[in-house]
Image: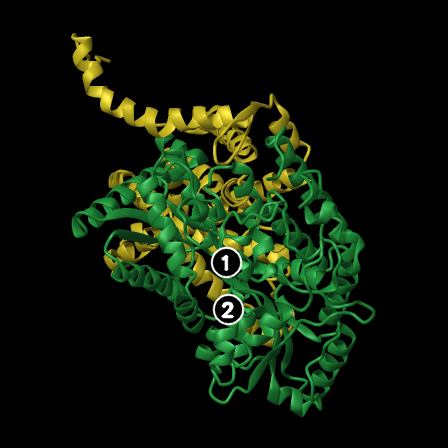
Amino acid sequence: MRRAYFKNNWIAALVVAPQLLIIFVFFYWPTSQALYWAFTFEQPWGGGNEWAGFENFRAILTDGRYWDSIKISIIYAAGATVLSMGMALILAVFADRQLRGYKYYRIGAIWPYAVAAPAVGLAFRFIFNSSAGIMSYVNAAFPGFWDPILNGDHALLMVIIAGAWKQVAYNFIFFLAGLQSIPRSLIEAGAMDGATVLRRMRDIQLPLLAPTFFFVLVINITDSFTDSFGIVDTMTGGGPARATNLMVYKIYVDGFQGLDYSGAAAQSIILMFLVIALTVIQFRYIERKVHYT
Amino acid sequence: MMVRRERDTDFSMGTIMKSTFISVFAVAAALGGAASAQDKITFEYWYGLGGYLGDVVQQTCDRFNESQNTYQITCVGQDGYATAVQNTIAAFRAGKHPTIVQAYDAGTADLMMSGEFYPVQKMMADFNIDIDWDNYFPGISNYYAASNGELFSMPFNSSTPVMYYNVDDFAVAGIDTPPATWEAFEEALRALEAAQPEKCNYGYAPSTWVDLEQFSMAHGIPVASRNNGYDGLDAEYVYNTTQHVKYMEDVKRWLDEGLLEIKTSQGGINSRDAFAQNQCSIFFGSIASHATVHASAVDGLNWDVAMIPVYEGFERTNTVVGGASLWVLSGKTEEEYRGAAEYLKFLATPESEKFWVSNTGYIPVTKAAFEQLTAEGFYDNPPYKGREVAMKSLTYTDPTPLTRGIRLGGFIQARAEWVAEVEAALAGQKSMKEALDTAAARSNDVLRKFERTYRGKTLP
């Protein structure tokens, strides 16, 4: 395959410079700053910071609460990813069938992605409110069935559902685009050979959707580790009893509220490596099973 | 895709963005101020109060600007105490900070250790502005003063907790005086439950400020060793060994017996609104809520306030101030400091205090203002009647070494530890004693880290 390339490297450098500059300013520079803070005792108002070595990391990694936070984050990521991808796939398959009114339906399904996380949090806070919301009817029938204010499992479930709901629209767009890029001729050929809808889906559409599926998976897992802040902040504030204290929320609480800059910096470095590691694993082990056409 | 992850992962990027945003904002504000007031000396003030109370802060600024021609104060609301401090720190690191910032009570130790401020008492003396510092209620000034008694920040919006109770519900239950002891309080809860079983008796939300800090003050018992941290950074939390444990165990028992209900914002309605909506008969909260309850109460709600109860066998002592004070930050010009001093002087006038007190639920911070308001009959009629209870609570005794306030580093984190553990205990995951032991131990880790961060320094 022929590749296009620039003979003049200066032009190439000039063209990529703005992008590199942006990446440097908004990623490498802050990351290096966080890295530096993670190895010092940083005073919030400035005015001196002492070298700490691995003390901040030691303090975090020997703290049971931090491991709880990691565990909760993994449960949240797995739960939200499975739920949102599953829902999005089902919705996309329906939209792809081009049943009557599917265009409106498509727009409707994309919409939720434009809703800001705190707004999603507020809406779901009402829906899951045990005494005033929709769940209060369930509680009226079965007293004590639902109590996210005291029960940590309920609170986590509530946050997972809200997070998944927000992500469904995003996944839907990709799944729908993926399904629509599958040549119609393949599906029609399958139909002529007598394959049912479900059969065509299993043998033709889903395998061809694999690259999209993989991309969406990586994005979803990354997103649920790093972008869950708004929902947690409005719905539970990390409670009850830290049951929804996801890693990214804990960084905010320790760093911005608690003014423990060094501890929060160390946590964000750990989170960064965790997400990198997860992405590498996905590329190494899952991508092998994906066939790009 | 990679960019996306990178964007989201790194937290300090938020700081950068925030500080960029703030500096843009600061420049815009400064330009705006300069354009409207050509020759005036302009300076900035960032405040944390939001909503209606924020509007009243803004009005104090307008009143100051109208009162003289030399200075122009630009007041910027940050919508929240915590955000005001966070944004100020970010701006400070970028050299774009305001001259004055409103910082909450719990952040006092952190600010004191930073050293990046101009002590108000010294500033006023430097500019030859005469303020009678003895005029401030000791329960208020001790909270913001150095060990030698010098005031570091200007007391501003001040409150203290009280018990709000529904007079009609109490009458139905046959209670004629509000309970002054926790033993009587429990009897009152039982009477309320018996009289109106379907109604929420006590809308409770775990609050360190009420349940731990002010509870300990009223009982004259320590929250932490070394006189609640006033005597050194090596203090340790001891609340897991005091009467506080008994109280929290009682709370848990009342919850289990159905005598109290948990009312939090996360649960849809906070305890104050539940009270104002006539859902619950009692709640504990800041006297600053007095105005809000008045404005939002359902028609015909007959309510009053009383001092927080004290267990039998304890001599009641004073409660301390909550709220925020005004800090003048370092790194500004003499002219800006002169302006800041004039503004603080303006706030300290009895007229300004009266304006502030009557438009909010906060209490006057000087004896002179309180006496003047009392003499004018301010506290005799609704909507202000009842607010004098807070003054009574605050000045019940002279502050003892244990009731000056709290001077503990990283106190916001310590509060969070307490809340998380108490929630666990209320949910039945562990006993209350266990929960408080854990919370105290973890909060001690915070103190040790704070001590380590400021190694070689001592509290001023």
Q: Split into 4 quadrants, where in the image is the N terminus of chain A? A: top left
- Residue A216 visible (yes or no): no
* Residue in the image at 31% along x and 40% along y: B23
Q: Which residue is mark 2?
A: B368
- Residue A170 locus on image (x, y percent): 35, 46
- The answer to which image quadrant residue B147 occupies is top right
Which chain: green?
B
The three-letter amino acid code for the residue at tag 2 is: Ala
The three-letter amino acid code for the residue at tag 1 is: Asp
Name chain A's colour: yellow
Secondary structure under tag 1 reads: loop
- Residue B322 locus on image (x, y percent): 56, 60
* Residue in the image at 48% along x and 71% along y: B361
* Pointer 2 or 1: first along the chain: 1
State yes or no: discs 2 and 1 in contact (Cβ < 8 Å): yes
- The answer to which image quadrant residue B275 occupies is bottom right
Q: Which residue is mark 1?
A: B132
- Residue A94 locus on image (x, y percent): 34, 53
